[in-house]
Image: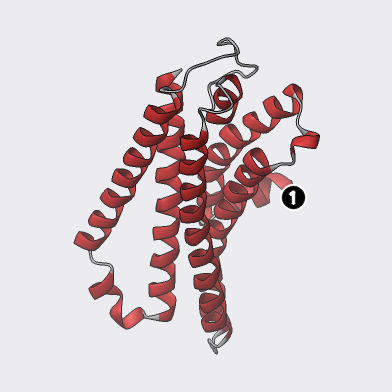
Amino acid sequence: CVAQVFLLVFFLGAEYFLLTIMCYDRYVAICKPLHYGTLLGSRACAHMAAAALAIGFLYSLLHTANTFSLPLCQGNALGQFFCEIPHILKLSCSHSNIRELGLVGVSASFCFGCFIFIVFSYVQIFRAVLRIPSEQRRHKAFSTCLPHLAVVSIFVSTGTFAYLKPPSISSPYLDLVVAVLFSVVPPALNPLIYSLRNQELKDALRTLTTG
């Protein structure tokens, strides 16, 4: 259970930070193309990727250590097919999970800041793309951004619904379905969405659907 929580939080946190970095990459490539080599050289990209993994590791370590330091007052059986922090907190003493809730609040604020950065960047990106006179260049710019935007939308929407849905609609069955959607659907769709930029795959799908 400890390993599941650690790996789940680590991969979710690292992916979200990497998606934020990818958004910055697209912003620089479209809005500041002359500075791309300076701002996003190979060393800068390696440093940002390492920072995303390090932040994900630290974020996961804090949550895991804090969650499993709480005493469980209501048994140790979870109504899920894998361990998640919210369900573990339901088993803990009501007065002992304040630290974890505070850590969740700080993490949520940081994630919300990344989300605002992504939205602001895409507003600037779309404004710059719409000013491009060439239709072919506009199409190329959009084809670069839309797969990433689709992945971000799926990741954020499923995660938001999974962890911020109203308690009034919560049930063991619904929690199980949402957990599956959140943990399985985004990773499964990522390769498909990004591979749609491959012209050979597009031609194969077009032949399959029209044939």
Task: Give the residue type that dot 1 points to.
Answer: Thr
Residue under the point 41% across and 52% down: 17
Which colour assignment does the render follow?
A: secondary structure
| Residue at 65% across, 34% down | 181
User: How far across and down, in percent of the image, does residue 31 sit?
Assistant: 43, 80
What residue appears at the point 56 percent right and 51 percent down from the top-left corner?
A: 151
Q: Nearer the viewer, residue 163 or 153?
A: 163
- Residue sticking out furthest to the left: 43
Give the residue at the far right of this rendering: 168
Q: Is residue 44 above or below residue 6?
A: below
Q: Secondary structure beneath disc 1?
A: helix
Residue farthest along the front direction in this orientation: 95
- Can residue 179 be seen at all in this image of the molecule? yes
Vertical placement of 132 versus 79: above or below?
Answer: below
Splitting the image into 4 quarters, where does residue 143 fall? bottom right
Camera-side residue: 58 or 137? 58
**Is residue 120 rendered to the left or right of residue 182?**
left
Q: Which residue is denoted by mark 1 in the rendering?
A: 210
Residue 198 seen in the current view: no
Q: Position of residue 162 (x, y in %)?
A: 65, 38
> Residue 127 appears at what percent x and percent y?
56, 82
- 8 relative position to 42: left or right: right
Horizontal and vertical percent position of residue 58 = 32, 40
Q: Is residue 88 left or right of residue 50?
A: right
Looking at the image, is 33 positioned above or below residue 191?
A: below
Splitting the image into 4 quarters, where does residue 149 fall? Answer: bottom right
Numbered disc total: 1
